[in-house]
Image (cartoon, rainbow, N blue to C red):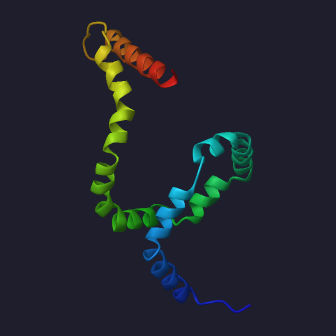
Amino acid sequence: MKVKNVESAAKKFVTRASQAQGDYKAGVNETNDQAEKSIASQEIYESAIADSIARGARVKGIEKSGGTAKWKARTMAVGPSRFATGTAAGSEAYKSGVKPYLDVLSGLTLTPRGPKGSPENLERVRQTNEALRTAKLG
């Protein structure tokens, strides 16, 4: 079978992807019931996860990925320039996600503090943990 060399394939990939922003947006806008379909496929998800665990796929994938050096190099190449804009774009989602927990914390009345390392301080940690866990689990 005749195939392109890797350099040509990579160049075409980058060129076409840079021109496909409209297609990307259209694909997102044309997709329907993403969440509903995901929920409906829970059994398939569980089966796939069990199979992945049985095959050791996570560890194999991590080993194949290039490790920490590759992750760090790629993250530093593209991450910093996207960090601020991504954070700004996620501001409302952050607020709605963190608000329930900040409300729980602001409503807590903890037992009095004790000296460093005291059982009283550990009790305060337990109270905080219990309140946050209850909020998370509903």
Residue 132, percent from left and from top? 42, 22
- Left or right, residue 32 beside residue 54: left
Please determine whether, in this image, residue 25 is positioned above or below residue 92.
below
Question: Residue extending furthest top?
Answer: 111
At 29% from the left and 63% from the top, the residue drawn is 81
Quarter residue 41 falls in: top right
Question: Residue extending furthest bottom?
Answer: 2
In this rendered view, identify the residue nearer to me: 32 or 7.
Answer: 32
Quarter residue 21 falls in: bottom left
Please determine whether, in this image, residue 15 is positioned above or below residue 22.
below
- Left or right, residue 73 beside residue 24: left
Residue 98, percent from left and from top? 36, 32
- Left or right, residue 8 beside residue 97: right
Please determine whether, in this image, residue 91 is positioned above or below residue 123.
below
At 30% from the left and 9% from the top, the residue drawn is 109
At 32% from the left and 50% from the top, the residue drawn is 89
Residue 36, percent from left and from top? 62, 41
Residue 80, percent from left and from top? 30, 61
Please determine whether, in this image, residue 18 is positioned above or below residue 107.
below
In this rendered view, identify the residue nearer to me: 47 or 55.
Answer: 47
